[in-house]
Image (spheres, rainbow, N blue to C red):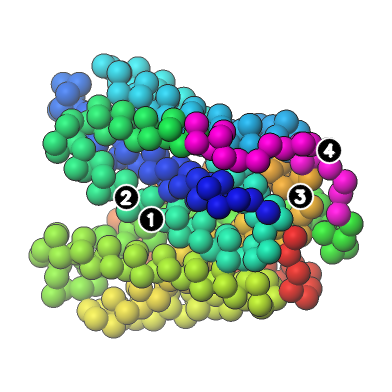
Amino acid sequence: MLNRPTTLLLNIGHALDHMFLLIFATAVTSIATDFGIERWEDLMPYSVAAFFFFGIGSIPAGRLGDLWGRRQMMVIFFIGVGLASVLVSFTNTPFQLALGLAFLGCATSIYHPVGIPMLVQGSERPGWTIGVNGLAGNLGLAIAAVVTGLLVKYFGWRMAFVIPGILSVVCGVLFAIFSPSESTAPAKKKSTSGSHEGMSVPKLLLIMTIASSSGSMLFNFSTNSNYELLTSKFSEISQDPAMIGFFLAVVYVLASFTQLLVGHLLDRVALKTLFRSVIIVQFFALILANMTNGWMFYAAQLLFMAAIFGAIPFSDAMIVRFVDDTMRSRVSGMRLAVSLGVSSLAVWMIGPIVKAAGFSTLIGVMVATSCITFIVVSQLPSTPIKDS
């Protein structure tokens, strides 16, 4: 079992991981102005490399985590992310910026396939551990907007990368000091029999990847369209951008805490039963959202976002439940590379769908995606509560 400083730093790492990926999006207007680019939209494509390497980098990161050691990889994560962020602050052209963000994407790709398996390794309550870690990651999204906005306003966009970068390097040094040494790399340890519950690893990986991909698509569909969706459905506040942002922030904060509830229940309710229950809530909340407006829609939006956020811990819980610790980082890396790549399509689909057929069709696509998740999760073995 990990000591408290290590556990705290691993949760901080999740918040930082999500925060660093959003600094650019928050500061893009200031960066464009500094680079002499008229429209900030013209600078957005230069961030593609960061998200590409964030996904594809999970495969080698997971492999190194299992075969070389998770502790060493996490030290590289903290320090690598910090140095890459500082590097971005020194860029002066869009091409240099793209290279800096690509390095940042490579470094951030380490956390999920390495940090989470390390966190749950030997945990007495893995479900709760995953829930707390998921909440930390979501709070990182909120911190990115607030902290980056303040740093850009008072110190400029370059310091918005430098200060968090230095913080990450400090966390890396602290992690190296406080985290216990690994006597043996995970892949070299003795395998625990029975973790796969009679199912082959390829079949389990397929189920987990499809379920994770559909869940990630729902996450991208919702988070990238919620602002305009709330504007179109809630006429009382549709003319006040600040009020819309406030109402949406309330939704995200409240919905994020669902991960704690799910994490608590994961240690007490069979995974398959609980996962399908959350998906059913998604399904009916999305249908309700499609049929309502005003305050009723807002209640439905809070409910479907709570269910979408509540489904996030299951991706890691499935790996903890069904995959032996000796190969969790590699399985997680492969699952992440595919699911992040597939789910990125959701962002590209939102504009054409809404433009051609409206938000009702978009919500219909989300309902269909939820159904796919339910069908795939139903293929998981029915097993008693047991995590390792």
Q: Check disc 4 and give the amino acid type.
A: Lys
Residue behind mark 1: 139
The N terminus - image quarter: bottom right
Quick check: 149 above or below 303?
A: above
Q: Which residue is mark 4?
A: 188
Query: In this image, 293 relative to 372: left or right?
Result: left
Label 2's element?
helix
What separation in Å lies between label 4 and label 1 (alpha carbons)? 35 Å
Q: Are marks 1 and 2 in contact (CB under 8 Å)?
A: yes
- Between 94 and 233, which is closer to the camera in this rendering? 94
**Region rendered in magenta:** 173-192
- The residue indicated by pointer 3 is 325
Compare marks 3 and 4 and give the one earlier in the sequence: 4
How far, Cα to Cα, is label 3 from label 4? Answer: 10 Å
Question: Which one is in front, 103 or 360?
Answer: 103
Q: CA distance from mark 4 to mark 2?
A: 38 Å
Looking at the picture, how far across and down is residue 318, in whole percent? 68, 60
The image quadrant of residue 178 is top right
For label 4, count other residues whose C-alpha is less than 10 Å away and answer few (under 14), some (14-19) or many (20+).
Answer: few
